[in-house]
Image (tube, rainbow, N blue to C red):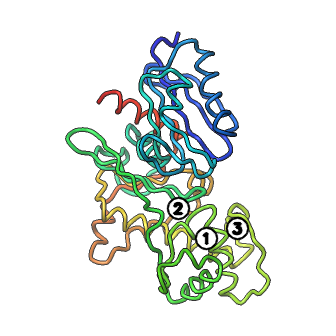
Amino acid sequence: MHEHWNLVADIGGTNTRLGVISDGKLADLRKYPTGTLPELLEAFHNLRDEIGTDPRAVVAAGAGPVKDGTIRLTNAHLDLSERDIGKATGAQHTFVINDFTAAAWSVAEISADDVEVLQGAETPPTGTRLVVGPGTGLGVGALLYSEGRFHTASGEGGHVGLAPRHSDEVEVFKAARQIAPECFFDDSLVLEAEMFLSGTGLPILYQAACMAAGHTDVSTRNAKDILEDALAESDPVAVKTAHMFTTHLGALMGDLAVAFIPTGGVFLVGGVAEKNRWLFKDDFRDAFNAGGRFSDLRRSMNLYVSEQDEFGIVGANNFCKSALAR
């Protein structure tokens, strides 16, 4: 049944999803605890045994840097190599890729059915595409379109600088220095973007906003609770936190868009965008478009929320198809 099949993996710190790809389409999806390296490789091996033939190719995507055919999976605290995957599965072709390389590839074949349009064309046009995902961290991926096909440019866009946009935010950034001093750029008020604009960053932003508001006893809260209070308008500091989050994220995405000129669209991906669509309305779009002399350029860009399920699996599959075609 799966004479010619590929295996794609989306590896998280806690769980791993393995997708069986037949004729370029997802035929089956399994979920396993990530566990140790031997346990992870056993999951690959057991799925191969269940199907009964070696996959032609395996692509494994996860959070962490890739070097010399090995990915250091920072959330799972293990190193996974293409060689290990080849031994476990018998695959001829093995690839390990960063999760935001996969996120970028997830929009390679995206259609009008897969997006909510925030601004611009109903159907994402062909061209360079920029993907930004506030999840546990802040991921940025670019899918560059050149000579009729896509190529990925991997980087660390989530670690560019973030600075106060208004005078009333200065005290918030000053307070954040007491919480995460190592994440500031020298002695400036410029902070790594991920320290505010992510699931792990939102609690830091909230704590700093509480301190700036004069609160002395600030308890640590998770991002979900903060955003729920902001939506209900039951906590003024949570409301300010959500406003800073969405406007700074919009501005950052607009800045990155000016750098890449993604004629194929700018895409929000991941759980925060999926579960908190209310954040990405007028304030977000206004901040994206506020570019001084380049405001008109920013307003001309296509801006979307990706609504694809399992975008990591989708991206690993699109990467796989492209790699095998080459």
Q: Position of residue 16 (x, y in %)?
A: 63, 38
Residue 60's place in the image compared with 23, above or below, is below
Identify the residue under disc 2: 280
The amino acid type of the residue labelled 2 equals Phe
**Of 282 and 76, which appears nearest the observer?**
76
- Say left or right for 146 vs 267: left
Dot 1 and dot 2 residues touching (CB under 8 Å): no
Question: Which tag is nearer the camera, tag 1 or tag 2?
Answer: 1
Q: Position of residue 240 (x, y in %)?
A: 62, 77
Identify the residue under disc 3: 226
Q: Quadrant of the C terminus?
A: top left
Q: Tell me the distance, in whole angstroms, between the alpha carbons under discs 1 and 2.
A: 10 Å
Dot 2 and dot 3 residues touching (CB under 8 Å): no
**Of 148 and 50, which appears nearest the observer?**
50
Dot 3 and dot 1 residues touching (CB under 8 Å): yes
The kind of secondary structure element at disc 1 is: helix
The kind of secondary structure element at disc 2 is: loop
The label number, if any, that marks residue 242 in the structure image: 1
